[in-house]
């Protein structure tokens, strides 16, 4: 019992110590809006769960509007690409789309065939 308590207290101490250092590493919303995030570390400082969830919701809305599909070669894919282009352009990037050949084999799942 004592060993489990010590182990738990050690883990809790590590978590508290880690969390206490995180705020000092964060850039803050204002800094993220005005600076160039040209390194992985700078970019990570500006990521938020709320921001990630917002993009997830946008992609889900695109899928919902396109029969649940965003696969390459479908209207859902085209809408997803446009979403990314719009977001990147709004962030100040010059976006270029490069065409490429994609060979697809579209098959229906066995579950849908048996229904």
Image: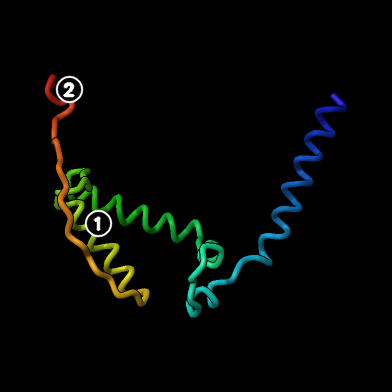
User: Looking at the image, is 19 positioned above or below residue 71?
Assistant: below
Residue that appears at 20% across and 52% down: 77
| 10 Å crowding of disc 2: few (<14), some (14-19), many (20+) | few
Q: Is residue 27 left or right of residue 83?
A: right
x, y percent for residue 93: 34, 74
Tell me the quarter of the picture where residue 67 sits.
top left
Cα distance, mark 2 to mark 1? 27 Å
Q: Residue furthest right?
A: 2
* Residue to which mark 1 is pinned: 80
Tell me the quarter of the picture where residue 105 sits.
top left
Residue that appears at 21% across and 62% down: 98
Circle 2/circle 1 CB separation < 8 Å: no
User: Looking at the image, is 93 positioned above or below residue 51?
Assistant: below
The colour mode here is rainbow
Residue 88, which numbered label? none
Quadrant for the N terminus in the image:
top right
| 10 Å crowding of disc 1: few (<14), some (14-19), many (20+) | many
Sequence-earlier tag: 2 or 1: 1
* Residue to which mark 2 is pinned: 110
Tell which of 24 and 37 is nearer to you. Answer: 37
Q: Secondary structure at mark 1?
A: helix
């Amino acid at each position: 019992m004592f060993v489990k308590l010590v182990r738990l207290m050690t883990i809790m101490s590590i978590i508290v110590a880690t969390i206490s250092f995180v705020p000092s590493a964060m850039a803050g919303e204002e800094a993220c809006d005005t600076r160039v995030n040209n390194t992985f570390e700078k970019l990570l400082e500006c990521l938020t769960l709320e921001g990630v969830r917002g993009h997830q919701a946008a992609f889900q809305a695109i899928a919902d509007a396109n029969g649940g599909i965003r696969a390459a070669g479908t209207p859902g894919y085209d809408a997803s690409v446009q979403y990314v282009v719009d977001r990147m352009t709004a962030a100040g990037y010059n976006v270029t789309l490069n065409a490429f050949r994609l060979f697809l084999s579209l098959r229906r799942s066995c579950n849908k065939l048996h229904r």
